[in-house]
Image (cartoon, rainbow, N blue to C red):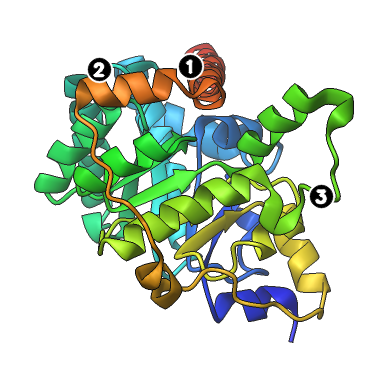
Amino acid sequence: MNQLDQLKAFTTVVADTGNFKQLAQFAPQDATTNPSLILKAVQQPDYAPLLADTVAAHRGRALDEIVDEVLVRFGLEILKLVPGRVSTEVDARLSFDSASTVARAQRLIGMYERAGIGPERVLIKIASTWEGIQAARELERQGIRCNLTLLFSFCQAVACGEAGVRLISPFVGRIYDWYKKQAGGAWDEARQAGANDPGVLSVERIYTHYKHFGIETQVMGASFRNVGQVLALAGCDLLTISPDLLAQLQASVAPVERRLDPDAARAADFKPARYDEAGFRYALNEDPMATEKLAEGIRAFAADSAKLDAMIEAQR
């Protein structure tokens, strides 16, 4: 049995891609997208007609509405290939505007419903700012399930759990990137790989907190740089993995051992944590890695959203 199939015995495997034509070979349960992945896909010849057709079908509408139609079109194609859910992201430029995030999420869900897809098959991705988490709190009350992304710190995870968010996506690889860059020549890859990887350790702490205190929010490790990071989190609720790493897992038959276990987490010695808005903002400020990576991630997604806007504007 290959490593991918072994991993599926412990963890729900999710494909992280806008390139939906790659999905069938890996048989993931769910799939995630983001503005950068969608932008990358529509620049390829295989997907350019999808963009052109969607823009043509909605010509005359506001630019932001056409953008959402493109995102939903990709989601609909993905849902033909996965049995579970697709994650569709709210514009990162709304990351500090709760009311606009709620409105955009409602619109996305409405677009899916008009296409015959119920809200149980869609997760709305929102950046894990304080404003994004409060928007997700309201959306969850309305029955719209959320995936809180760009999550780098324990305080973000705690606040998401308190808000009743359905799922979070802590970014393993980007945490790893930050610590490796900070260490420079002193970084020891062998010593800080696998279970000692700082991104892996962050997810393990969040997972333990949730399971120990019976918090129902699901943990989906994301943004992996190598297979070692994936395997070190075997047993996490979900893992969203790029096609390149899925292929590496599929090509190996080395044994996979469960690393995260809910029973062990419930038995752990773990202190409770809570954050009001002031406490959340201070804790985030005290974590330079999380502060920098959250801001950087929002800027990058916003920049790619602007590029997608320009591509659509040129065709409408």
Q: Amino acid at mark 2?
A: Asp
- Residue 72 visible within the image: no
Residue beneath label 2, please? Answer: 97
Q: Nearer the viewer, residue 150 or 243?
A: 150
Q: Position of residue 59 (x, y in %)?
A: 37, 22
Quarter of the figure that contains the C terminus = top left
The residue that appears at 23% across and 38% down in the rendered structure is 136
How packed is label 3: few (under 14 Cα within 10 Å), some, or many (20 or more)?
Answer: few
Report which quarter residue 210 is drawn in.
bottom left
Query: In the visual, does 146 lie left or right of 307?
Result: left
Secondary structure of the residue carrying numbered label 2: loop
Q: Nearer the viewer, residue 83 or 186?
A: 186
Residue beneath label 3, please? Answer: 191
Quarter of the figure that contains the N terminus = bottom right
* Figure disc tally: 3
Q: Amino acid at mark 3?
A: Arg
Question: Which of pointers 2 and 1 lies earlier in the amino acid sequence?
Answer: 2
How packed is label 2: few (under 14 Cα within 10 Å), some, or many (20 or more)?
Answer: some
Q: Residue furthest left?
A: 142
Q: CA distance from mark 3 to mark 2?
A: 41 Å
- In the rendered image of this protein, does residue 57 appear above or below residue 303? below
Q: Amino acid at mark 1?
A: Asp
Secondary structure of the residue carrying numbered label 1: helix
Q: Residue furthest bottom?
A: 1
For residue 309, the mark is 1
* Mark nearer the viewer, 3 or 2: 3
